[in-house]
Image (tube, helix red, strand yellow):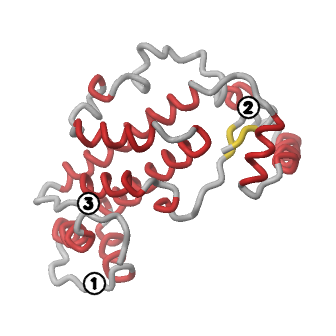
């Protein structure tokens, strides 16, 4: 992660979310979400939604906590370490702004850095998970484990990990929600040919093949 002179955050992430998520986090998410649905597909989707909402809240809190000052020399070093030129990023941004002046919203960009418009004490996005009806039902042990593994990461890697964890949960939720996608995943990724093609049975088979592990064999 690095920022440009406007304070806009840029991330360099892997195409595979598992590459950016700490192994312990991925394992905790798998144990919580890659489980048999027991005929309750809606409940499984609600658990995915709750975890996604929690991760989104932590991303909002991350942006809100960023300092206003930007040390361009330091940011350039981190960009270079990620294989990116900060000068080229800023030039590309300037070209984009010149081409899309009508769509460019300075307030929206500054909002990545300065979130004074948020009430950090009362905004529902930044309250504790137990104060939000969407996330209140999450297992406390899971939340504590995710907090320990994600929120204590160094700032420069925390955002990528949060984004990757969100993408990972979203991928699993998509499989749960889409019958054809779930079947195709079992056939093409797992090499499995399930006999029972009922949606809930496919979700259970997917959980059985993962056996609480996030990675594929």
Secondary structure found at label 2: loop
Secondary structure found at label 3: loop
Identified at 67% across, 29% down, the residue is: 108
The Cα atoms of the two marked residues, 3 and 2, are separated by 38 Å
Q: Of discs 1 and 3, which sits in the foreground?
A: 3
Residue 88 in the image: state x and y as whole percent: 86, 50
Q: Which residue is mark 2?
A: 7
Q: Which residue is more in the foreground, 15 or 78?
A: 78
Identified at 11% across, 59% down, the residue is: 39
Residue 129 in the image: state x and y as whole percent: 32, 29
Secondary structure found at label 1: loop
Specify the quadrant of the image occupied by residue 179.
Answer: bottom left
Quarter holding the C terminus is bottom left
Identified at 60% across, 56% down, the residue is: 13
Q: Residues within 10 Å of mark 3 (few under 14, many from 20)?
A: many
On screen, residue 158 versus residue 190, left or right, reads right
> Label 1 near label 2: C-beta < 8 Å?
no
Q: Which residue is mark 1?
A: 192
N-terminal-most mark, 3 or 2: 2
N-terminal-most mark, 2 or 1: 2
Q: Is residue 189 above or below residue 207?
A: below
Give me the disc on residue 34: 3
On screen, residue 208 versus residue 113, left or right, reads left
Quarter holding the N terminus is top right
> Label 3 near label 1: C-beta < 8 Å?
no
């Amino acid at each position: 992660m690095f920022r440009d002179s406007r304070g806009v955050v840029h991330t360099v992430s892997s195409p595979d979310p598992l590459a950016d998520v700490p192994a312990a986090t991925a394992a905790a998410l798998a144990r919580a979400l890659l489980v048999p649905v027991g005929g309750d597909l809606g409940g499984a989707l609600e658990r995915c939604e709750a975890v996604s909402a929690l991760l989104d809240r932590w991303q909002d809190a991350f942006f809100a906590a960023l300092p206003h000052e930007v040390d361009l020399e330091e940011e350039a070093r981190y960009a270079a370490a990620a294989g990116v030129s900060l000068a080229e990023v800023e030039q590309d941004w300037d070209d984009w702004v010149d081409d899309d002046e009508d769509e460019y919203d300075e307030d929206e960009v500054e909002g990545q850095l300065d979130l004074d418009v948020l009430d950090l004490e009362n905004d529902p996005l930044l309250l504790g998970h137990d104060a939000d009806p969407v996330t209140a039902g999450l297992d406390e042990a899971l939340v504590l484990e995710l907090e320990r593994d994600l929120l204590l990461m160094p700032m420069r890697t925390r955002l990528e990990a949060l984004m990757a964890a969100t993408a990972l949960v979203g991928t699993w939720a998509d499989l749960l929600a889409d019958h054809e996608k779930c079947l195709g995943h079992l056939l093409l990724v797992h090499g499995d040919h399930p006999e029972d093609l009922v949606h809930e049975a496919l979700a259970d088979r997917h959980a059985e093949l993962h056996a609480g592990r996030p990675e594929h064999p």
